[in-house]
Image (spheres, grey):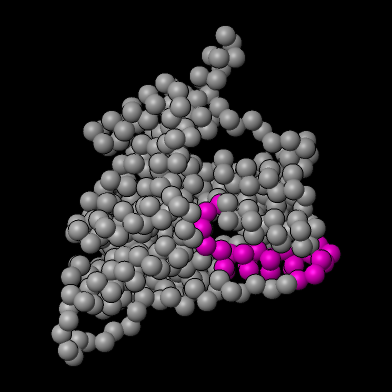
Amino acid sequence: MRPSSSPQGGLPSSPASPVDRATALRELAGLFLRLGTFAFGGPAAHIAMMEDEVVRRRGWLSREEFVDLLGATNLIPGPNSTELAIHIGHRRAGWPGLLVAGACFILPAFFMVAVIAWAYTRFGTLPKVDAVLHGVKAVIIAVVAQALWGLLRTVVRTPLAASVGAAAVAAAFMGVNELLLLLLSGLAVLAWRGMERQRPGAPRAGVAPLWPLLSLGVTTATAAAPFTLHGLFLFFVKVGSVLYGSGYVLLAFLRTGLVERYGWLTEAQLLDAVAVGQVTPGPVFTTATFIGYVMGGPSGAVVATAGIFLPAFVFVALSGPLVPRLRRSWVAGAFLDGVNVASLALMAVVTWQLGRAVLVSPLPVALAAVAAVLLIRYRVNSAWLVLGGGCVGVLAAGGLSAG
């Protein structure tokens, strides 16, 4: 049985005093504003940086609690790292913490992407960011690998977990759908635990909340329509309500809806939007901010961003209070154990693929090695490592240009 936690996740189990709540909210705001400003590298990197901050440094959550929340985010649609931030805020400071953590993680990326979109609409090109990313991505490899190693030691503690994890990694490399992989892993562990129990009259319990799976079938065939802010908002609410998977899945949704069905966006604009979402820190879903600005100016940026992130807050608000209760049910707990293993398997595959793409020359290899030493041996904050990697990338690019 894993240790139970209070709804406040670190605050006293009794209702928090105004001072306690205010302090917790300030801490959440400071942490997630910083992460939203420096968390480059996509969801895997964001999750790694959150684990470093809330588990290793601050002790707000145990590794078991953190992994449970990570597994829960994989069962619902939407941006995983943003939903994890919202979960952490809810655990730390209740409903106000839920709003503060989520908003503070999103806002820095929103403003950065909006500024880039303004420059794009005025000058017609994207700023050059290759040099920054060249250094940042190398550091991200070390950050993600370190977090993944710590989480694996927590989750993969039995031959069953190791077997399910290995099968999940193989399936991910073969291109099996991420949601199907999570579902099958959870069911595999559940079936095995059920056979292990094999005693009549075992207590019945509810299963993990799989109702979000139904949303996969929620699509609407809509004819081409003139652009309106109302239509833009509804489109992004639908995307945020049904989207599982990576940024490439987001690209497919946006292309089908905005380019092919509505004709609101060109292929070139869509690819530029996705590129901006990938290269800026914070949630990749701020791609919606860029698209909204291009189509509707500042109002469009606000409407699109609110639309795509609103479902994440709703889903976490509905499912968050259930996560601690899942551990009191052997059925739900077994299923969640399987989902947790599969989640880390997916994270491992992403890390491997990113490493193969990035560690192709001496400079990024050296950067990743130095970052790993600083992170593990000296516990340097991962945000500073990411910033330093970006600076090294810019300096290296400048030296090459001068040469």
**Which residue extends farthest right?**
226
> Looking at the image, is 123 positioned above or below residue 332?
above
Is residue 334 toward the left or the right of residue 228 in the image?
Answer: left
- Quick check: 159 left or right of 132? left
Say if the magenta span includes residue 303: no
How far from the left and from the top, in percent, is residue 322? 36, 75
| Residue 354 pos. (x, y %) | 45, 39
Where is residue 70 shown, x and y percent of the image? Answer: 37, 60
- On the question of residue 283 being in view, the answer is yes
Q: Which of the image's four quarters has the N terminus?
A: bottom left
Where's the C terminus, which quadrant?
top right
Q: Where does the image place residue 200, in percent across and percent down from the top left?
A: 17, 89
Residue 375 sits in quarter: top left
Residue depicted at 69% across the width and 36% down the height? 126
Range covered by the magenta-colored residues: 222-247
Residue sitting at the far left: 199
Q: Is residue 111 visible?
A: no
Furthest-bottom residue in this view: 201
Please count the marks in the image: 0
Q: What residue sits 29% from the left and 73% below the top? A: 190
Which residue occupies 71% across, 61% down?
Answer: 257
Residue 357 located left or right of residue 289: left
Q: Does the magenta segment cover residue 224?
A: yes
Q: Nearer the viewer, residue 173 or 282?
A: 173
| Residue in the image at 22% along x and 51% along y | 153
Q: Locate residue 96: give its quadrant.
A: bottom left
Res. 119 image quadrant: top right
Nearer the observer, 100 or 401: 401
